[in-house]
Image (cartoon, rainbow, N blue to C red):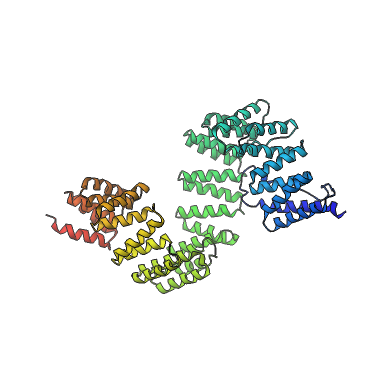
Amino acid sequence: MIYKRILAVISIAAVSILNGCTTVGSGNNDQPDPAQQAPEVTEEALPSRPFERDTLFELLLAEFAGKRNRADVALGKYLKQAHETRDPQVVERATFIARYLGAHQATLDASMLWSEIEPENPAPRELAAIELIRFGKLEEAMAQVDLLMANGGKMNFEYLLQASRTSNQETRQAILAKLTEYTQTIDDDKLWYAKGSLEAMNGMHQQAIEDYDRSLELTPSYGNAILARAQSMIALNQHDEAMKYLAKQTSLWPENKRLGVAYARYLMQQNQLTAAQQQFYRLSRNFPLDGDLVLSLALLSWENKQTDEAKQYFNQLLDMNHRTDEANIYLARIARSEADFDKASVHFKQVNIGPHYALAHIQYALMLEEQGKIDDALTILDQAMDAMPAEKARFTMAKSEVLNSAARTREAVAVLDQGLQEFPEDTNLLYTRAMLKEQLDDFSGMEADLRKVLELQPNNSAALNALGYTFANRNQRLNEAWELIERAYNLNPSDPAIIDSMGWIKYRMGETQVALDFLRKAYEAFDDQEIAAHLGEVLWVTGQRKEAAIIWRNALDKNPESTILKEVMDRFLPTTP
């Protein structure tokens, strides 16, 4: 009797394992993936049958493998026993384990075997159809769908749509033709939605909207169809209409959280932050236990400079014990902006080891540096480095920044030297040391570090620009400087610093009009003191002295301690007639 009953125990254990897998990446779709729907099984519902000792042993090994997070081993053993025993429940387990692992060929093989054993069961045919579409076997996939419906089953056409998203244009067109054929005899909300979605993929948005409307006539609250309709309206440049449509639908179906969140995010994309904040507020009232909605409200309040509201929501996250590290970082930033450094310190310290730990402690150290507490800042970084050695390179960078800000540049270089002994190919450490060596007039050392960066990352536009600009600024090796800066510009043509370098090298090479064009473009993109100094100099030497003086003085008003502005003004302004 033990051999007969053990299959029931194994099957129940398998469902437990499979249900555990569903918590990963389940998302918030209206319809879950079929791979995430493990069937409910009870011991009483399971038939008993005798198994050979070897079979039982293999099934038990499979379960132990699953318990030890070796689902790949479990799958291999289940597939072997599925073919040897042809037991429906063993085959079913093999199929669902394969689906959880994303093993498409194994899923197809197991689901086809399952269909052969239980030809009237719709579940394996649905899974087989999905996998056949993935492999581009459209005719075989549609044959499975036809058999499923002929046996009285109901196809979830959303699953078919999901599988077709990765198909080529020809396959999608053939699927669309088949779905169009089905609409002649089947009136199903998911069928119309899938048909409309395929039409939208092909750019047929007006037809897609008509099909979404047919779907919504059958199920007015169908969130996927509502969102897809809005997306097609946007694709047709009907932005205002789409906004009104989403506003109406979210008010009609306030219980649909996914729909409400999508509307709020669309408002954010349109930079309507106040309206987005109001929408998240309505959602949070409907779903008061959803911490992610509270976080969204907190961040929008922060963006809208509503500090008191932001603090309220971030503190609410702490009370909920949800996203506490992020809440503490933002509460620390708020306290820092209010000069409440003691409170900021408390919040920074409460960030736990994890993805936000390094950021929090680096910001904490920089706050201490701003207060002149250099040694305290260095201590915080050393302690953080010990607590989280995986981020040692980042903490080393931060230590060099603290020391350099305190005019202890040689010590900053020494810290980077030590870091590079452990991480000799860390391009961030190399680049930072190069910039500090330039401050110490160690140009050969700077060049060596930048050459090393480019050896490791030939397309590092920042290193190309830095090296080329240094040559141009020293009026040396101008042809090489041009080659380096031009490469950087081709890689990153929108970077104001690189555009400035393009203008500066052209000035050094005597092409003043081209230089002016680049420098004006750079200054428009980024109102920076160094770009202002460069633009003013080229304007001055081309006779546009009044404009040059205005640019310099305006920049100096914003940066009264700027040495580069003072130097260029001292060189030129005393010669004013």
Relative side of 551 to 201, left or right: left
What is the quadrant of residue 254 in the picture?
Answer: top right
State the image coordinates of residue 103 (x, y, percent, origin top left).
64, 46
Question: Looking at the rendering, in which quadrant would you find the C terminus?
Answer: bottom left
Q: Residue at x 51, y 34 (%)?
A: 233
Q: Residue furthest bottom?
A: 375
Tell me: 436 left or right of 325: left
* Viewer-side residue, 548 vs 568: 568
Q: Residue at x 48, y 36 (%)?
A: 239
In the rendering, at what x and y percent does residue 70 appear? 67, 56
Task: Reply above or below: 159 against 186.
Answer: below
Give the percent coordinates (x, y) of residue 154: 71, 35
Residue nearer the viewer, 240 or 84: 84
Residue 556 seen from this side: yes
Q: Residue at x 49, y 64 (%)?
A: 391
| Residue 347 can be seen in this image | no
